Image (tube, grey):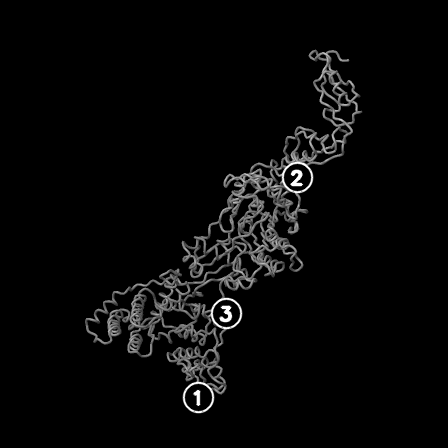
Amino acid sequence: MPENKRTASGALGGIVGLVGLSAVAGLLVTAAVTPAIAVSGAAASSAITIFDKMPSYLQPDELMQPTTLMAGDQVLAKFFDQNRSPVTFDQVSPVMYDAILSSEDPRYYQHGGVDLIGTTRALLSNASGGETQGGSSISQQYVKNVLVQRCERDAKAVEKTDTDPGMSRDEALQKCALEAIQADGVEGYQRKLQEMRYAIQLEKEFTKDQILLGYLNIANFGGVTYGIDAAAKRYFNVPASQLNIGQSAVLAGMVQNPNRFRIDQAEGSIFDNDGTAYNKAPDGSIDDVDQGTIQALYTLRDNGEITQDQLVAAADGYSETKGRQLYVLSRMEADGKITHEQYVQFAVEPITPQITSTDQGCAASSAPYFCQYVVSTILNDPAFGAGTDDRVRALRQDGLTIQTTLDWRVQDAAQNAMSEYAPQSYDGIKFGSTAVNVESKTGRVLAIAQNTKFTQDASLAQTDPTYNSVVFAGDSNNGGSIGFSAGSTFKLFTLVDWLEKGHSLNETLNGRLGPVPSMTNSCTGNYVNTSRTVINNFNNDRGYVGTPLRFTRDSLNTGYLQMASELDLCDIAKTAAKLGVTRGDGSPIEMKYPNNVIGDDNVSPIAMAAAYATVANGGTLCQPKVIDKVTASDGSERAIPERTCSPALSPEVAATAAYALQGVMAGGGTGSRANPGDGTPMLGKTGTHEGHETWMIESSTNTTTAVWVGNYNGTVDLFRKYFNGLQLADIRYPLARDIQSASNDFYGGDRFPDPASNLLRTQQRDLPDVVGDSIDSARSTLEGLGFRVSVGDPVDSELGGDKVAAQNPGAGSAPAGSSITLNPGNGKGGTVPDVIGRTLSAAQNDLKAAGFENVAIGPCKESDKAPDGGQVTATEPAARTATSKSTPVTLSLSAKDCP
């Protein structure tokens, strides 16, 4: 156990150390700079002045620590420049303190920050050209590490210019470390003297125990392993409190040259089986460290304290580190910290590390694409710093604990479904698939799954299609994707705008295939189809006259184009924006052309999931979020990225849109194959873009799943290509179904609100008189007005079969979308002429002229105002009725004297 009380001489050293060292430093620096000149009193005085004017106060910074992403109580991933787990003084084994002090600073509790004896000896040896010696006290080494960490913390990449070759961040970090240990020439002495200056002042501010612990917490132990606790766990799989004598000696021996003496890179033994040392170096030499190992073990063997086999085994694999361990053990024995028996016990014991992983980054995560989306959020959000360098430090150095929104139950279900249904690659296709599940009422992203394996190695992703670094579910800002063409899932925004403009789901429109109608766009200019462009339906469906309710269920392109023609494309674009959807590159949706109505723009699956979740959530948009809480290393809470929930749609519009989208998931709807069928009410929408990209988005009131399957680069058709018996274009259905089923199990779902009655109304429309028109012309006129048309049996009429002889109902008004029956003439009858208002004799003559000989007098009403001869007030059959000429025509009259 280290001594924790300073002796009287140590206290005195603390008081007079600065004065004495100033003089020594002045002489040594002067001798180093002007070796050929005799050291005069003036020169020494000048050097002393320089030393005295050096900065004296050094405030140790917060230790760099790994930032940890958490998902529930499980670690999602870690990120670090320095893998460290700081401990308190009592959390370090006492023998570790003994080992580090005996080997590095045996007079630590006696000096005042600088060991004048060791330092003077080292400086004189180095100045005279002898073997380079360290001579630094623990306090000085702590100072050096503090300065290195400060440099590394501020290290940043430098862009290449015409005059500057530039520097990567890793190169900047290496430069910091190199400058800290640089000991050549004047700069080396200046650095050493500055360390002394700081060390002396440091001991005035902190206790010996605090400095010793600070050193063990900050020191490097090879690679990215920093601090005694991380080292104990890395090399021996124990906490620092459980280190034994041998393990402590290994770690204490490392600090002199951590990357040389690390024990996660095994070597061979330096002994043959007969105990003969062999030379590992190409030139046949044995270096000083190995030589020391050999001599120490030979001594023990020759003294009969160990056997030949023990000698061979003792240095097997880590000979250089064994040498350092033996040195530390010898110093501990010399200082009385261990007995000779303990020295022999651990000297003969082979170094047997139990290496634990220090993997970091998303590639080591069980949910790598979710992880990478979180990383993108951290590196792009001002909550983690004003600039890129600040955010990188937050991710790699600040020791944050970031609680993410991931739910392993949904994530595992999503990735399992992805593995089952989607191939990691497909010959001839840049094939990709992603699925995201979002909590509708909060925006919390519960899962992100992808078909490819994650890598940040761009060259690997280019040569092996099973790897990718892009998060397909994200966008260019978060995840590196530019999104994918939305297909018919984009029809949501036309549907919402239709309802917001007061239109009904039960209005009737002509959704038959034909030239795209002209469209209004108050933002970028109207669209006029001068070339009579036709946009087809899926499966070459010819379309029909129908309602938006039916168009939505069947995903009829031509129906939605007709809806859009009665709206403003600019307003549809604004609807997408207020539901949180932009292009994948972050630019706004513009809706310049009709193909934008049916999903030509690239969009993010996460953004589309949030838009559908808004409908399921009664019109409240909750922006997608992946971070619930951020805690600093000291336990305080830090700000998280700002994400809000706010009304985007009226509850009436949201409920009515949900009503329409529920039809998609019901029997006969295009999304019915993706319905979990577990009794949870579902809404949804399918999407297909040109056969090379497919979507399925579905939602309960509580969770929303968005699935995309397609070409992440290219336009190869997914139809008639199969994986495990399933057409690539159909993978979306079971994939979305299984993920949504899992989230239904854990989050449930309620009944959607009833639609607004005024948005379901049936409208009355003017019905023109088409009798006498050709059948085709009459059909076109009526369907263009949103009526359905059927052709009945021919009726008696003088008109031929290509003409409308009768329509039912007749001219006037009728419910929008109602069916109008047209009857062609048979050429054998006549049409009752309109004789209302004619005198009786004139009416009889007109009827006879039209071929109707059988004319009868019907009801007669006497009136003083009637003209002489009476006046016809009605006929039966009615005027313009097509009928046989033998049909009796009865006249109703008004007369002064009825016959």
In this picture, is 511 found above or below 887? Answer: below
Q: Nearer the viewer, residue 536 or 774?
A: 774
Residue at 21%, 75% in the rendered image: 37
- Residue 545, labelled with which disc? 2
Q: How many marks?
A: 3
- Quadrant in which the N terminus is drawn: bottom left
Mark 3, other Cα within 10 Å: few <14 / some 14–19 / many ≥20 = some
Mark 2, other Cα within 10 Å: few <14 / some 14–19 / many ≥20 = many
Q: Would you name the residue on which mark 1 appears? A: 302
Q: Nearer the viewer, residue 798 or 424?
A: 798
Residue 652 seen in the current view:
no
Three-letter code, disc 3: Thr
Dot 1: element: helix
Point out the tag, 1 or 3, that comes first from the N-terminus.
Answer: 1
Point out the tag, 2 or 3, that comes first from the N-terminus.
Answer: 3
- Provide residue 125's location: percent of width, then percent of height: 30, 78
Foreground mark, 2 or 3, reads: 2
In this picture, is 683 found above or below 874? Answer: below
Mark 2 and mark 3: Cα distance apart in space: 68 Å
- Provide residue 460's location: percent of width, then percent of height: 52, 64
User: Quadrant of the rendered structure where residue 495 is?
Assistant: top right
Three-letter code, disc 1: Asp
Asked if the residues shown at circle 2 and circle 3 are in contact, with their CB atoms under 8 angstroms apart, the answer is: no
Answer with left or right where residue 403 lies relative to residue 48: right
Dot 2: element: strand
Three-letter code, disc 2: Val
- Provide residue 748's location: percent of width, then percent of height: 60, 50
Point out the tag, 2 or 1, that comes first from the N-terminus.
Answer: 1
- Residue 356, labelled with which disc? 3
Mark 2 and mark 1: Cα distance apart in space: 104 Å
